[in-house]
Structure formats: structure tokens, C-alpha cells
Amino acid sequence: MPVLLRHLLAIGPANPIAVRLVQNGSRRMKHLYVRSAYLGVLIIVLLWALLIKGGTGTAMSYRDLAAAGAFSFTSIAYLQIGLICILAPVFMASAIAQESNPRTWEVLLTTPLSGVQIVLGNLFGRLFFVIALLFASLPLFALTQYFGGVPGRSIMASYLIAACAALLVGATAIALSVSRLVGKRAVFTFYIGVISYLAVTIALDRWIIASGGGAGAGGIGVTWFTAINPFLALHALLNPSTYARAAVGSQDSMLGRWFLESPVTAWCVGSSLLSVILMLASTITVRTGGLNSITVEGSGVPWYRRMFGLGASGAEHRPPRAVWNNPIAWREAAARNSTLGRILLRWAFIAAGALFGLAMLAKYHFGTLTTGEFRFAMLATIWGMLVVTALVAMNMAATAISREREDGTLDLLLTTPITPGQYLSGKLRGLIAYILPMIAVPCGLLIVTGVYVLFGGLGRDGGVTEISTRVGPVPVALPIMFPEAAILAPLVLLPFMAFCCMVGLQWSLRSKGTIGSVVATVAVVGIISGIIGLCAVKSGDQFGPLGPALTGLSPASLVFSLLSPEASLGVNLNSDQAVASARVSLAFGSLIACMLYSAAVYGIHANMVRTFDMTVRRLAGNR
């Protein structure tokens, strides 16, 4: 089984905590009764709605039948949201009650499970029963389509609203459990808090509408509370005439466009993001004592050093750390973050790139930057970050082995049972783990921009598509960026950075000192990537459909083609059909580049393992 697939299974379906919760819960008769009652109530309400709206007559028109189907769907959709909001806290409250006992946490934290596995296992294991309820009711919603009047998109949207509500409730319960600031008495408070929040937001929404503050005509329509309440979001979805949204383009602020023009999307996206934030916070604090770890006093360690997992300055002891399965990989990644200065410098670089890129996107959204200026700024930012990341990766890789040879550490490692394959694989994994956050910034900017383009600019004046006449006699509509950049860029960047690290490790193994290995690595990678990049850029508007595929062989030319397609691909975009063909060809070329760089990494690694002993013995004694 591939390592990545096994890792994903360990986090999700095969997570031992999730498996335990699902198996134990499936054996309880109480859960069976709850599921049966849930379906029974929905079936009864569906039949009642059909009988009430359909009447007792034997003949019905198609229009009456469609109205009956729409009324029954609306009834069970509201009921399903209500039942989910009532039952989700019941299923999730056990997370607070069971894990609030300190002894439970003491036992759980002695296991080799990571923080992600602990948090997601608790979430998925308990959320499974809520999702099972939603899937169990799907046939009932499907039946309503036989009567007409019920679009399939509305059914899916209602399920998405309910699922997001359950996810948010579950994430909140897990966060309260992990914080360890509450006890069993918080279960009732949690349940009452969920119900009270729904009731208060609905009451405020009604009050605003009664005061004429709604976004629709005459002050009757959605409000600012619609996007933060699942009932109100469903009401906006099912009643667009009586609970109207704001007209498209009527709101000046981006927040107003989201909340008042697209409340359903705002609820789903906002609740999902909030759930992810809660899960991330829980993952970070689960093995450090929860939120209690922030208030621990008397340790003598400043808060800013505790935040980075460091001990007191000049202390003889440091906080214990969890070592990975491959100790070489852990040591390589952890040694780079051994001082506070290195940690701050690395994260300052990441934060500066992310904030600058997001600022450019915000300026473009509000019209401060033109399309050309935005493309240039984003291209320069991403190229600059990639160059810096590649140089950091090559420098670290080129000194990873030669430095250990100089200080004698390599001689000690060779006396351990660690094999050459484990040693080299650990070096590569540790280096990739260190530079992964640096790679994530340019990839994240491309993902955010791609989502921005997919959503049509979130209501931006003029949209995100421009008519280009630079690619041929026929004007062609091109977006500011191909949204598939969110997938294609990481697909090529990760194996390319691994290739840079592998070349550095090879020269680090062969060279006598660190200076020679660094110079050789930069020269080799620079020559190879320069030749491929120049050929790829020149091939973009030539060789017909093959040109875009060749462009994807280099990370620099790939980013250039994704951000400025008319400047890179040229005549290959002279019609709408040619644009579609070029995008497919570019994706195919990116896939080929991923396989080529991965094959090069595998080949270099295999050769280094085969010649490791001979090379080390030949250079033995060099300092």
C-alpha cells in the first residue's frame, strides 16, 4: 500500500479512535432507536405534507402535484435541519463528557497517535452517526422529485447546509473537549448554548425585517444574520421571493456581497472555515495540555519560547519531543529549527510572502491594480519565493552530509543499525518537511487566486475575464489566471524541490567539504533548470498543441503560463477551442514533469544507496 494512502487512511477511515467510536456506538440500542425515530418522523411528516397539500380528490393536475411535492420537500428540509441541530449536540456532547476526565487524556496521550489523529478520530467517529442520518434520509428527498417542483440542486444545497451545521457543532464540541477547561457539567451548557444561539439569531433576524432593514425590496429579505444561521440560510434557499437576497452588485463591501447577496454560500464556506480553524487549534494544543498549557506558571520559560516548543534560554534541559519513525528525518527537520532566530526568520519569510500576495489580490479586487499590474506582482512574488525556497533547499541538502563528515557525526551514525537507504530517505524527508511550509505559500496564493477566479471575482466590478486581442485576429475571453493552477503548480513544485534536495545530497555525499558541495549543487541545478526553462518558455507559442505541454516541464514557465497565458502560449489561444486544448495540453505536460522529476529523484536515490559504502570509505578521514 502506498505510504500516502496509508497515512490518509490512518487519519480518516482507519483511525483507531474513529473505529472504536463507530464500533461501540453501533452496538448501542439507543443509537438504533434514535436513527429509527429520526427516519420515522421524516416519513410521517412527508406523508402528512403530501396528504394535506394534495387533498383527497382522485384527480390532480400536474401543477397541483408539483406544488404538493415542493411543499413536502420544504417541510422535511426544515425538519431535517431542526433534527440535525438537536441531535448533533447529543452525539457530540459525549466528546466533552468522556474526554473531560484527566485520566482519559493521560492514557490517550501515551499512545503513538499524533495530534491530528486524536482530534480527527474523535470528530469523525462521532460525526459518523450524524452523517449517517443525512444519508439515510436521502431516499425520502429523492421521492419528492417524482412529483416535480423540486430541483435537484436545492436538495443538494439543503444537505450541504445541514452537513456544515453538523460539522461546526462537532468541531466546537471537540475543541471544548481538547481545551480541558470544562468538565461534565459543560455538556448541558453546550447543548443549551447551541439552541440559544439558533433562537437568538432568528429573533434578531425577524426584528431587523420588522424594522424594514432587510436586503430585499421594501426592507423584507435576508439580513446579516442569515449567513450565520443554518435555518435562515435554508429559508433564503427555499424562499427566494419572500426572503429575497440583495441584488447582485448592490453591495459595496466584499463582506456585504457575501452575506447579503450569497448567504447560503457564506454559511457553508464560513462554517467550514471556522470548523477547520477549531480543528487546527485543537491539533496544536492537544498534546500540550490544551488551553491550560497557556496559563501554566512557574515553568521559567517565556511564552514566546514555549510557543515554538523551546526551553528557557541557556537551560541544560529542553522539552521532550516526539521522534518520527525515521530518526534521521526527524533530526534533519528539527535541527533546522533549533534556535529561535531560525524559527522567526523562516516564518517571517512565509508570513511576508503570504500577506503581500493577499494584499495584491485585495488591491486588484477593489480596482487599485489593473489586470496587468496584478499579474506582474503575483508572478514576481511567486517566482521570488520559489527561487529563495530552491536556494534554501539546495544549501541545506548540499551541507547535510558533508557537514556531518566534517564534524565526525557521520562516523558515529555508521556504527548504528541505520541502513544507507534509511539514512538517505530520512535526509530527503527531513529536508522536504522543513521547506514544505515555504512551498505552501506560493501554492496557497495560487489556490486562493484560483478559487477567486472560479467564483467570478466575488462580485468584482468588471469580473475576472478580459477579452484579449493579442493572441490572434479573433478576440478571445481569457481569465486573469487559469484556475487549474491550484492543482498543477503543487503537482510540479513538490517533485522539483525534491529533485533539488536530491542533487544536493548527491554532491554532499561526494564532496570533501561544504563549500564545494554547495557550489556544485547550485551549478548543476541552475544549468539543468535554466536549459529546461528557456526551452519551455520558447515552446509555449510554437509546436502547435505540443507547445503548452512542453511549457509545463519547468516550474517557472508553468507559473508564467498559468498567470499570463496570452504572453506565454500566444497563438495557441487564438480561439475558444484552442484555449481548451491548450489547457488540457498544459495539464498533461505538468503530469509528465511530475513523473520525470519523481523518476530522477528515485534514480539518484537508488544510485546513492548502491554506491554509499564505497563513497564513504573513499572519503573516510577527511575533515
Image (cartoon, rainbow, N blue to C red):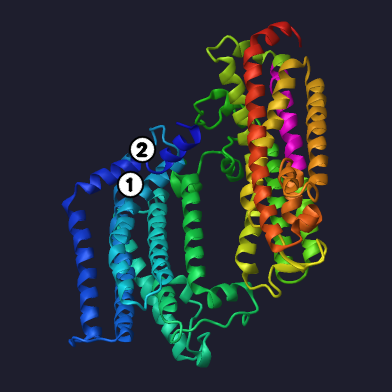
Query: Do the CB atoms of the residues marked 1 and 2 lie less than 8 Å apart?
Result: yes
Q: Which amino acid, by three-letter code, is at mark 1? A: Glu
Closer to the camera, 132 or 177?
132
Picture layout, residue 7 above or below residue 563:
above
Picture layout, residue 225 above or below residue 94:
below
Classify residue 127 as left or right of residue 284.
left
Q: Distance between the residues labelled 1 and 2?
A: 9 Å
CA neighbours of label 2 inside 10 A, class few (<14), some (14 to 19), many (20+): some
Q: Which residue is drawn at 71% across and 15% down?
A: 405
Q: Which amino acid, by three-letter code, is at mark 2? A: Leu
Closer to the camera, 465 or 384?
465
Q: Residue at x 71, y 56 (%)?
A: 357
Q: Name the residue under label 2.
A: 108
Q: Name the residue under label 1.
A: 99
Q: Give the range drawn in magenta.
A: 385-404
Closer to the camera, 10 or 479?
479
Q: Which residue is drawn at 65% across and 79% down?
A: 252
Classify residue 358 as left or right of residue 11.
right
Quarter holding the C terminus is top right
Question: In the figure, residue 373 lies in which quadrant?
Answer: bottom right
- Residue 46: x %, y % from top left: 24, 74
Helix, strand or loop at label 1? It is: helix
Picture layout, residue 293 above or below residue 92:
above
Q: Which residue is drawn at 33% across and 81% down?
A: 66
- Residue 59: x %, y % from top left: 22, 87
Helix, strand or loop at label 2? It is: helix
- Residue 456: x %, y % from top left: 63, 68
